[in-house]
């Protein structure tokens, strides 16, 4: 089953369809027509196996094979059930609700007891295993219970400080960027990550800010930045081929 990171955060209950073999309701899995009963196999005496004994000198060899008459079942159905044709099993498509807990990991297996294939000769059903795959998120990456993302900001915002809207798994919230913030600075939003699967609380959201450098500037913008560089004592390229 494929789910989203938002599903991991909130948990969900989802309906799936499966095709499986179930015990025939007409004969209760016996394979015999109602009103009749399977009989013990006369060849293997109900064991489903045949022993072949061979003696050679002082050695005695015993070989055990599956009974051909009953095919290892130990019983023979003389009058087959018309619904399942004597197999005792029928194919059914069922809708099953799967409850996915909060904080589940990618690749986890959920076991649904007695929701698998029918048992042999009317025995109990096996289990159904659902493997969980978490889709790759377009914004966030997961690290245990933490989520990580990168947010671009302008160099003037990083220099003078600002307040920006940042995404979370439950909508956008405001984040204060202090003045003088350097690129690749990581801010932590406590408790905005994923729930812990077998515990309390949530992880954090880690936001890495990437300071953007403008590639195209107008003449006025170039002049302003050049003046700023002079004020800061930084060298810049003013004319092609010459350094100042």
Image (cartoon, helix red, strand yellow):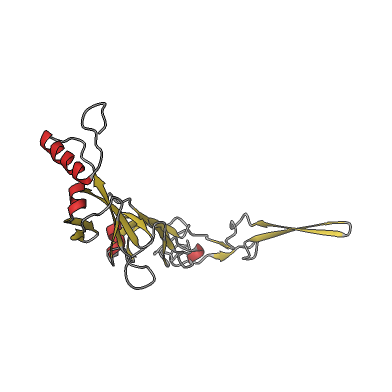
Residue 63, percent across and down?
73, 57
Residue at far top of view: 241
Residue at far right of view: 57
Residue 232, percent across and down?
22, 46
Q: Give the mark count.
A: 0
Q: Residue at x 13, y 37 (%)?
A: 223
Quadrant where the C terminus sits is top left
Is residue 91 visible to us here?
no
Quadrant where the N terminus sits is bottom left
Q: Could you say which is closer to the camera, residue 196 or residue 159? A: 159
Q: Is residue 219 above or below residue 28?
A: above
Quadrant of the image occupied by residue 6? bottom left
Q: Could you say which is closer to the camera, residue 72 or residue 128? A: 128
**Horizontal side, residue 61 vs residue 150: left or right:** right
Q: Residue at x 21, y 47 (%)?
A: 155
Q: Residue at x 89, y 57 (%)?
A: 57
Q: Could you say which is closer to the camera, residue 59 or residue 190? A: 190
Quadrant of the image occupied by residue 21? bottom left
Q: Could you say which is closer to the camera, residue 20 or residue 149? A: 149
Residue 86, percent across and down?
47, 57
């Amino acid at each position: 089953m494929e789910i989203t990171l938002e599903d991991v955060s909130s948990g969900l209950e989802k309906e799936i369809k499966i095709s499986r073999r179930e015990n025939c309701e007409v004969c209760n899995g016996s394979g015999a027509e109602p009103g009749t009963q399977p009989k013990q196999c006369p060849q293997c005496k109900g064991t489903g196996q045949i022993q072949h004994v061979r003696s050679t000198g002082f050695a005695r060899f015993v070989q055990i094979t599956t009974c051909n008459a009953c095919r290892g079942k130990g019983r023979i159905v003389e009058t087959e059930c018309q619904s399942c044709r004597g197999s005792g099993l029928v194919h059914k498509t069922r809708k099953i609700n799967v409850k996915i807990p909060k904080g589940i990991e990618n690749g986890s297996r959920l076991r649904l007891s007695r929701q698998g294939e029918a048992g042999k000769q009317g025995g109990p059903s096996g289990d159904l295993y659902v493997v969980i795959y978490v889709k790759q998120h377009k914004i966030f990456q997961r690290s245990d219970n933490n989520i990580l993302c990168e947010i671009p900001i302008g160099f003037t915002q990083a220099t003078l400080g600002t307040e920006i809207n940042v995404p979370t798994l439950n909508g956008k919230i405001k984040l204060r960027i202090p003045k003088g913030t350097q690129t690749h600075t990581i801010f932590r939003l406590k408790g905005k990550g994923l729930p812990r699967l077998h515990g309390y609380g949530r992880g954090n959201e880690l936001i890495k800010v990437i300071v953007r450098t403008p590639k195209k500037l107008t003449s006025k913008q170039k002049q302003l930045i050049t003046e700023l560089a002079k004020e800061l004592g930084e060298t810049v390229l003013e004319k092609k081929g010459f350094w100042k």
